[in-house]
């Protein structure tokens, strides 16, 4: 896509998030987390296609694979190179389809090897991927988070001014029950919920019959619980898996198709919500709840 095409598509960038004195990415206007309390719901697929949709809309965009134990971005974007440092101080991100990229997967000698790290090493790696990577000036940095409500989300909430989180779920209760926990965690550490993406919402067979394989209503239920909009319902489509496995996500491979357009619409919705929150002045520094409670029981302290 040419500069003229992207500039024609891009609307005015949302007002920048609040950047503190110790923020590791001061040149990034907005940081968007893609997360879920549940594994296997399509966070990496959503994060990758959302980032590509933002880039295709003309926004300067980066994608950080924050899933240290299970990095998917190298495969989904077909990137096998290794990052280098030109100044001996910062790491140059890799690039693909106009995205700036970083993943622990780029640094592994054996892509099938397991990363066996304790929490402090995980925290240190994330700090390096933010502070020591030359992200430069970006409109959006999208972070693909691991499942659960553990160290990664807590570390990010402490160190980074986050614009908000996009929660990904599938419709059935076995997924939504865990996503509710992720929403609750975000509330406790003051990460705004930008909205909900319901993935694998339905499947349309060759006869045109719609099948809701995982039930229905889960995404809207999470949206109601989080008091945030249901941003998108993404159907099951074989092309998403095929293109992702080939290293060219569906937004890049078939942007005019139904699924490609669904992700482009998702990006538009995310920009709209980020803009509205910025205009409301809702972007704040993280606040960790240390008040304790529950019959005298205190939460473990979280320090800045």
Image (spheres, rainbow, N blue to C red):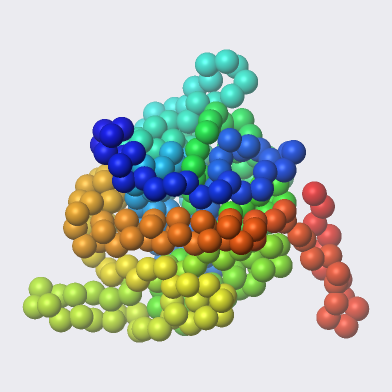
Residue at 64% x, 72% y is 184
Q: Residue furthest top?
A: 87
Report the side of 229 relative to 28 (left or right): left
Report the side of 161 relative to 291 (left or right): left
Report the side of 49 relative to 221 (left or right): left
Residue at 30% x, 42% y is 8
Whether residue 18 is situated above or below residue 291 in the rendered picture: above
- Occupied quadrant, residue 281: bottom right
Estimate the x, y position of residue 29 in percent, counting from the top left: 56, 43
Residue at 35% x, 80% y is 214
Estimate the x, y position of residue 104 in percent, counting from the top left: 51, 39
Does the rendering let one see residue 78?
A: no
Q: Quadrant of the N terminus?
A: top left
Residue at 44% x, 47% y is 12
Whether residue 180 is situated above or below residue 274 in the rendered picture: below
Q: Residue furthest left?
A: 207
Estimate the x, y position of residue 141 in percent, counting from the top left: 51, 44
Give the camera-side residue of 11 and 122. 11
Estimate the x, y position of residue 263 in percent, counting from the top left: 33, 58
Give the camera-side residue of 19 and 223. 19
Tally of marks? 0
- Occupied quadrant, residue 125: top right
Whether residue 132 is situated above or below residue 23 in the rendered picture: above
Does the rendering let one see residue 227?
A: yes
């Amino acid at each position: 896509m040419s500069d003229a095409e992207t500039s024609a598509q891009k609307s005015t960038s949302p007002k920048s998030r609040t950047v503190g004195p110790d923020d590791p990415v001061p040149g990034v206007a907005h940081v968007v987390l893609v997360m879920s309390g549940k594994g296997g719901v399509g966070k990496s697929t959503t994060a990758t296609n959302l980032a590509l949709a933002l880039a295709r809309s003309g926004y300067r965009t980066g994608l950080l694979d924050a899933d240290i134990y299970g990095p998917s971005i190298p495969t989904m974007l077909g990137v096998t190179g290794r990052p280098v440092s030109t100044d001996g101080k910062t790491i140059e991100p890799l690039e693909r389809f106009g995205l700036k990229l970083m993943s622990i997967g780029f640094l592994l000698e054996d892509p099938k090897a397991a990363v066996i790290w304790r929490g402090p090493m995980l925290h240190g790696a994330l700090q390096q991927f933010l502070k020591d990577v030359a992200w430069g000036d970006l409109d959006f940095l999208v972070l693909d988070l691991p499942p659960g409500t553990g160290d990664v989300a807590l570390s990010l909430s402490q160190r980074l001014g986050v614009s908000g989180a996009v929660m990904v779920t599938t419709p059935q209760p076995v997924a939504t029950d865990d996503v509710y926990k992720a929403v609750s965690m975000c509330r406790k550490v003051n990460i705004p919920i930008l909205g909900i993406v319901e993935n694998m919402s339905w499947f349309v067979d060759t006869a045109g019959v719609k099948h809701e394989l995982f039930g229905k209503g889960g995404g809207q239920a999470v949206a109601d619980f989080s008091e945030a909009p249901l941003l998108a319902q993404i159907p099951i489509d074989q092309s998403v898996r095929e293109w992702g496995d080939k290293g060219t996500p569906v937004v890049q491979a078939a942007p005019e198709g139904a699924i490609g357009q669904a992700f482009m619409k998702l990006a538009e919705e995310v920009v709209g919500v980020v803009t509205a929150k910025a205009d409301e002045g809702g972007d704040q520094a993280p606040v960790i709840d240390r008040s304790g409670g529950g019959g005298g029981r205190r939460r473990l302290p979280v320090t800045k």
